[in-house]
């Protein structure tokens, strides 16, 4: 070894204390990505317990040997098989939407980068399809990264831990999602909860089987066009068997499910008793001139999961 | 439960009726938005589609180290997007079956009747059940469209579908749409 090289080596020597810090930082990154990839894997391959319970209960209502019964049977087998094989429930692994809840002082930018890297790695592993396309050129980079994708929302919360929720929202059900502006004269829907009820029923009727029913709805009453759609989708984070703390909305949620299941659209639109698994409604203030109702339709392959990370970014707890 | 085996023919699919639950064995070609637009724009298909079944599907595929493809998830995609093109593809290239989800419109229904073709509905989202029935990947065409949009030539065994539009002008989608509309009117 030449003198020069020795000197250089000495000058780049890192103090043990600093080394520990660097290793910890690297470990943190590695661990964060491992946790995020595991979150993506589970979200893509296993339906949450509340969804499984709801689907199982609904399947029992269908007439034996009907097409609806047959479809529900395939759906249940698919749920078992996806979990067993650890492969996507549906090939359309959807828009990848992260909701990150973090304590004050948390750095969002590096976390965002780790989410992106994890999404790309999860795609390579086959948990996500190459599903993100440039809207202007049609180019699919195959990484699931691009302008506006994945969709990442950050929220500061009072807790000391980082929570990450993930929704994979397929295109079929996104395409039948809808936004109405009240009053709607063709439906006779005015600016009240009765009007809201009417437009939700209309959306479910229009969707028929195209959104891979039986579906689940997230609804927002009010807000501007953008926020209304955003809050509607965020309702999909609620467990299907929870209760709305707002009395009137709770009543409306139940009524919508009951009425939709009388429409006879059935699983996949084959006809049958189960058209809708659940309906979750929230509200947001509006300006006097506007009254939007946004409806986010989620398919039966309801992919939603969440994790709480410990201080080393390992998975401490599953949220659903 | 009925069976439809390869080679397919217009005559065989004409025997199928709306509501039939069918297990298909043989060959399928995937094709969705990009492929349909490509054919509509006057380009010739890279494979002969005469008497074949087209599957509206963008699968999740993995290539192993030896370059062999496997399909790990393969449910149907929404068919109605191909409504402007499907009738032409049926007419010009002689396909006798379309597999997808959500059903299609009048143009496709008319083409099914005129040329002898059937619309099969697979269970949307059932990507694992359906991928299990794919026994081999036999070809990949138009890869430049991206893997989900390319044409995949697949061999399937007992692929489970329901006839929702037959070659006699019947459509389960039309029936359910109309009957649910009546019920909706009553509750609005």
Image: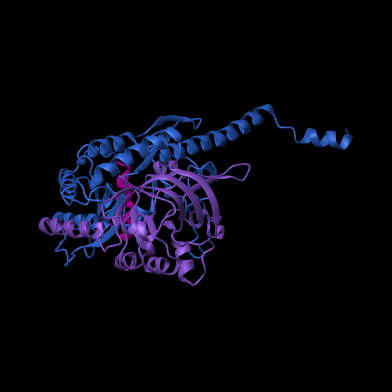
Chain colours: A blue, B purple
Q: Position of residue A72 (x, y in %)?
A: 28, 41
Q: Is residue A38 left or right of residue B105?
A: right
At 49% from the left edge and 50% from the top edge, which residue is drawn?
A: B154
Vertical position of residue B70 compared to residue B141: above or below = above
Provide residue A11's location: percent of width, then percent of height.
Answer: 78, 35
For the N terminus of chain A, give its image quadrant.
Answer: top right
Please tell me in which quadrant of the rendered image residue B118 appears: bottom left
Is A256 contained in the magenta span?
no
In the depicted view, which residue is nearer to us: A65 or A77? A65
Q: Residue furthest bottom?
A: B42
Q: Is residue B11 visible?
A: yes
Q: Which segment did they paint magenta?
A: A222-238
* Foreground of the two, A303 or B58: B58
Main SS of the magenta part reads helix
Residue A126 vs residue B35, the one in the foreground:
B35
Q: Is residue B136 above or below residue B53?
A: above
Residue A223 is a magenta residue:
yes
x 49%, y 35%: residue? A35
Q: Position of residue A84 (x, y in %)?
A: 42, 33
- Looking at the rendered structure, the number of numbered marks drawn on it comes to 0
Image location (x, y in percent) of residue A146: 51, 55
- In the rendered image, the quadrant that contains the C terminus of chain A is top left
- Judge whether residue A279 can be spotted in this image: no
For this orientation, the residue located farthest to the left is: B186
Q: Residue furthest top?
A: A16
- Residue ranking furthest to the right: A2
Residue B172 sits in which quadrant?
bottom left
Q: Is residue A196 above or below residue A114?
A: below
């Amino acid at each position: 070894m030449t003198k020069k090289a020795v000197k250089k080596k000495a000058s780049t020597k890192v103090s043990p204390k600093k080394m520990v810090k660097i290793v910890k930082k690297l470990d943190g990154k590695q661990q964060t990505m491992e946790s995020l990839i595991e979150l993506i894997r589970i979200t893509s391959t296993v339906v949450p317990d509340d969804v499984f319970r709801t689907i199982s209960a609904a399947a029992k209502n269908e007439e034996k040997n009907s097409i609806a019964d047959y479809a529900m049977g395939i759906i249940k087998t698919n749920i078992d098989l996806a979990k067993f094989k650890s492969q996507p429930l549906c090939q359309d692994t959807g828009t990848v939407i992260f909701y990150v809840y973090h304590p004050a002082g948390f750095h969002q930018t590096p976390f965002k980068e780790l989410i992106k890297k994890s999404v790309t790695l999860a795609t390579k592993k086959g948990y996500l399809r190459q599903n993100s396309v440039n809207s202007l050129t049609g180019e699919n980079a195959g990484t699931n990264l691009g302008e506006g994708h994945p969709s990442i929302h950050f929220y500061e919360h009072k807790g000391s831990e980082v929570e990450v929720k993930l929704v994979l929202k397929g295109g079929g059900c996104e395409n039948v999602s809808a936004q109405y502006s009240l009053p709607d004269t063709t439906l006779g829907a005015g600016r009240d909860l009765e009007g809201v009820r009417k437009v939700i029923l209309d959306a479910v009727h229009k969707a028929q089987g195209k959104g891979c029913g039986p579906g689940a709805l997230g609804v927002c009453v009010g807000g501007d066009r953008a926020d209304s759609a955003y809050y509607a989708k965020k309702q999909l984070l609620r467990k299907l068997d929870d209760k709305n703390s707002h009395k009137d909305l709770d009543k409306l949620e139940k009524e919508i499910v009951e009425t939709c299941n009388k429409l006879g659209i059935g699983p996949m639109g084959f006809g049958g008793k189960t058209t809708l698994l659940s309906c979750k409604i929230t509200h947001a203030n509006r300006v006097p001139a506007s009254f939007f109702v946004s409806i986010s339709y989620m398919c039966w392959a309801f992919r939603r999961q969440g994790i709480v990370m410990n201080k080393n970014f390992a998975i401490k707890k599953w949220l659903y | 439960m009925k069976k439809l085996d390869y080679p397919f023919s217009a005559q065989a699919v004409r025997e199928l009726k709306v509501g039939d639950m069918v297990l298909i064995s043989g060959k399928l070609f995937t094709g969705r938005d990009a492929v349909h637009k490509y054919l509509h724009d006057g380009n010739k298909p890279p494979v002969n589609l005469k008497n074949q079944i087209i599957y509206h599907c963008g699968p999740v595929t993995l290539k192993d180290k030896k370059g062999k493809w496997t399909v790990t998830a393969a449910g149907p995609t929404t068919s109605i997007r191909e409504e402007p093109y499907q009738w032409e593809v049926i007419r010009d290239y002689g396909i006798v079956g379309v597999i997808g989800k959500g059903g299609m419109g009048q143009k496709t229904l008319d083409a099914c009747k005129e040329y002898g073709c059937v619309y099969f509905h697979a269970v949307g989202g059932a990507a694992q059940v359906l991928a299990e029935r794919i026994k081999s990947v036999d070809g990949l065409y138009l890869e430049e469209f991206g893997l989900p949009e390319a044409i995949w030539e697949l061999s399937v065994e007992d692929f489970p579908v329901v006839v929702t539009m037959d070659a006699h002008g019947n459509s389960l989608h039309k029936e359910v749409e109309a009957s649910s509309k009546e019920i909706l009117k009553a509750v609005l």
